[in-house]
Amino acid sequence: MSDEKYAEIMREFVRSMERNDIDKALSFCTEDITFVSPYGTFKGKEKVRLYLIWMLNTLKEMKFTETGVGILVKGDKAVYEHIITGKYDGSELEFLAICTYLFENEKIKEVRDTFDRLTMADQAVKGWLHKKIVGTIVQQSRKGLD
């Protein structure tokens, strides 16, 4: 399969999620897909379905925008750099995500999703105490940079 065909499968996979069409997204995946994210590892279409339902119910109006290197494909492996935007509990979120994909028989066999949950928390947190706690953690993580 060509590199561009794999890239198009990845784009259609995320477009399906943008449209909340989980069945369409899963149609691009093998039955034994593994989806690894900061929230855990989900194996098989049914576990991945549950994760995607949770994700789409948690981050509303999710959009994916290619950025940086965009999509790079080499053989049956690919990397997808993108910005994810959406709404969490009424707050607008925007964060960088880098996903790696492994393909088998023209289907997605594995996705490894990497993003910074602290950046998300810093944007989404509400209430003065929670803002203070997350703000302190962010400040400590940047110690020496500012």
Image (cartoon, rainbow, N blue to C red):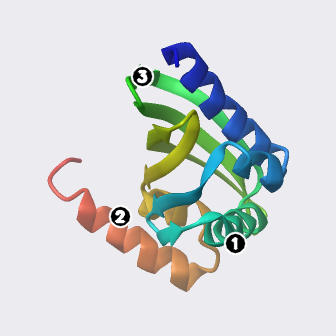
Residue matched to label 3:
72
Residue 50 has which mark?
1
User: Does residue 4 sit above or below 66 in this rendering?
Assistant: above
**Dot 1 crowding, Cα within 10 Å, few <14, some 14–19, many 20+:** few
Residue matched to label 2:
138
Q: Nearer the viewer, mark 3 or mark 2?
A: 3
Q: What residue is shown at x 44% (from left), y 73% (from top)?
A: 134
Disc 1 secondary structure class: helix
Residue 68 locus on image (x, y percent)? 44, 23
**Dot 3 crowding, Cα within 10 Å, few <14, some 14–19, many 20+:** some
Disc 3 secondary structure class: strand
Q: Are marks 3 and 2 in contact (CB under 8 Å)?
A: no
Q: Quick one: 22 or 113, which is closer to the camera?
A: 22
Left or right: where 10 falls relative to 72: right
Residue extending farthest to the bottom is 129
Disc 2 secondary structure class: helix
Q: Quick one: 47 or 124, which is closer to the camera?
A: 47
